[in-house]
Image (cartoon, rainbow, N blue to C red):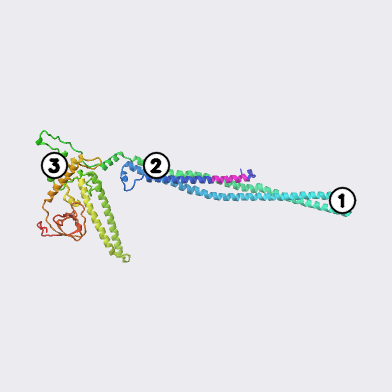
Amino acid sequence: MSWGTELWDQFDNLEKHTQWGIDILEKYIKFVKERTEIEVSYAKQLRNLSKKYQPKRNSKEEEEYKYTSCKAFISTLNEMNDYAGQHEVISENMTSQITMELTRYVQELKQERKSHFHDGRKAQQHIETCWKQLESSKRRFERDCKEADRAQQYFEKMDADINVTKADVEKARQQAQLRHQMAEDSKADYSSTLQKFNHEQHEHYYTHIPGIFQKIQDMEERRIVRIGESMKTYAEVDRQVIPIIGKCLDGIAKAAESIDQKNDSQLVIEAYKSGFEPPGDIDFEDYTQPMKRTISETSLSNSRGDSKTELKFTSKSKGKLWPFIKKNKGTGPEDFSNLPPEQRRKKLQQKVDELNKDIQKEMDQRDAITKMKDVYIKNPQMGDPGSLDHKLIEVGHNIEKLRLEIQKFEAWLTEVEGRLPVRGEQTRRQSGMYEAQNTPSVNNCAQDRESPDGSYTEEQSQENELKMMATDFDDEFDDEEPLPTIGTCKALYTFEGQNEGTISIAEGEILYVIEEDKGDGWTRIRRNEDEEGYVPTSYVEVCLDKNAKGAMTYI
């Protein structure tokens, strides 16, 4: 089965067919190219979809994704992102392995086809030239033969005519012989040309054209094989990513299986637990005996009427009144005392962790500066070691401040975790606040007034009563005899005492020491009769009077 023998006379149809084959190949290239564009667009849409539903950083939404169901959703989004990546791989592989390869092959195929059909046209032109030569030789032979016949007939006529001279007869005879010779020569030329044409025609139809058509057939069959291989590659490119896509889907299924409803319920408890106990039973108040009324410790009247006296005689420190104060919509107190105990513990722990991270950053910076200083010492041409001293001092001060902050928050955290009713002296110094123990009546009253959102509200009259209670207690505290001075101190740095119980000092100021550092990093000082409080020990240079035994008089 060969086009050269079977289709020897179908040159034009073969030319049309091979052009159609190239058009089909280009159409397939266009199809694959559009498929790659679809894959890229689909991958982009999947990535945008995944990004759209990702929680925003440092937002409340990010905090909500601690639940297992939300974590599973995040895993699904991440897997979808990987899933989109596989579609990008499909696009890249199809572009490199099919589109680019076939585009290059089409260009080569067009050149090869052009060459083959050029050879075919050249062969046709040659056989047509040979045919024209044959026709020309044939017509010349035919013309010479006719001329020879006419010359012979003219000679015979002249020879038969008795009126014609012998010279004219001889001339006619010679002319007839000449024409006869020309006819013989034309015959020989025609015969030679015919033999040559037959040979060329045989070579044309049995050698040249079959050879050219065979090359065209091979070219077309290679095109068919190539498009088949490309279709197979098309399928393989898809098949190669199926295992990875399967892993993505398995990841989504695994994330779904990791959802734990009990764990999520526990997280809700941890997020919103206040730490209070439910209110107790209210005692019966017998009004039939006016002089012997029994007031329940859990009743609201007790907290309104007797909490002042009870606070006054149970402790020498200021009461913690936060359960009665309306929720502050702005920034809360530094120790998060406006929050329920459990929530307060979490906030304090977060604050301690943040401070520890800040300290680590400062220490890393100090180590880096120290190493740089050592390099400058060893290689003075690189820099002046003294230029880094002020940076080391600044970093040291920052670390000291952060450590003081950590001590303060750790003290508050220890109190909350231990559920201590009264803060110790050390904690009181670190926080800079004097707080009193809450009585059972106060706690119960706070619980009775707790709102569903965790805020605590109270009637205006109750707030006024509480303010009066705190004022009376402050008056009692102020009536205490002031502590004697035990030395003096000089402020090394300026300190802004923003918390209650602390005092602001200016650099270079001389003050009186009334209580030395007990190991908590705070020293109690006095400026005058009305101003005293705690300052960081590292901010002052203390000079104690060794002879002072509590009898030193304040000046």
Residue at the farthest right position: 162
The quarter of the image holding the N terminus is top right
Between 469 and 63, the residue placed more toward the observer is: 469
At 89% from the left edge and 54% from the top edge, which residue is drawn? 166
Residue hosting label 3: 306
Q: In what element is the residue under mark 3?
A: loop
Q: Position of residue 540 (x, y in %)?
A: 19, 59
Q: Say which residue appears at 55% left-offset and 50% top-offset.
A: 108
Residue 63 in which image quadrant: top left
In this rendering, the answer to whether 327 lies above or below 515 is: above
Residue under numbered circle 2? 249
Q: Which residue is mark 1?
A: 158
Pick the front one: 207 or 25:
25
Gap in Å between the C-alphas at discs 2 and 3? 67 Å
- Precedes in sequence: disc 2 or disc 1: 1
Circle 2 Cα neighbour tier, 10 Å, few/some/many (<14 / 14–19 / ≥20): some
Residue 52 marker? none
Residue count near mark 3 (Cα–Cα under 10 Å), binned few <14, some 14–19, many ≥20: some
Task: Left or right? Give the position of 201 relative to 241.
Answer: right
Residue 19: in magenta span:
yes
**Residue lying at the far top of the rendered structure:** 288
In this view, the residue in front, 170 or 467, is 467
Mark yes or no: residue 277 visible: no
Q: Position of residue 303 (x, y in %)?
A: 16, 41
Secondary structure category for the residue under label 2: helix
Of callouts 2 and 3, which one flags the residue occurring earlier in the amino acid sequence? 2
Q: What range of the chain is rendered magenta?
A: 12-25
Front position in the image: 397 or 246 = 397
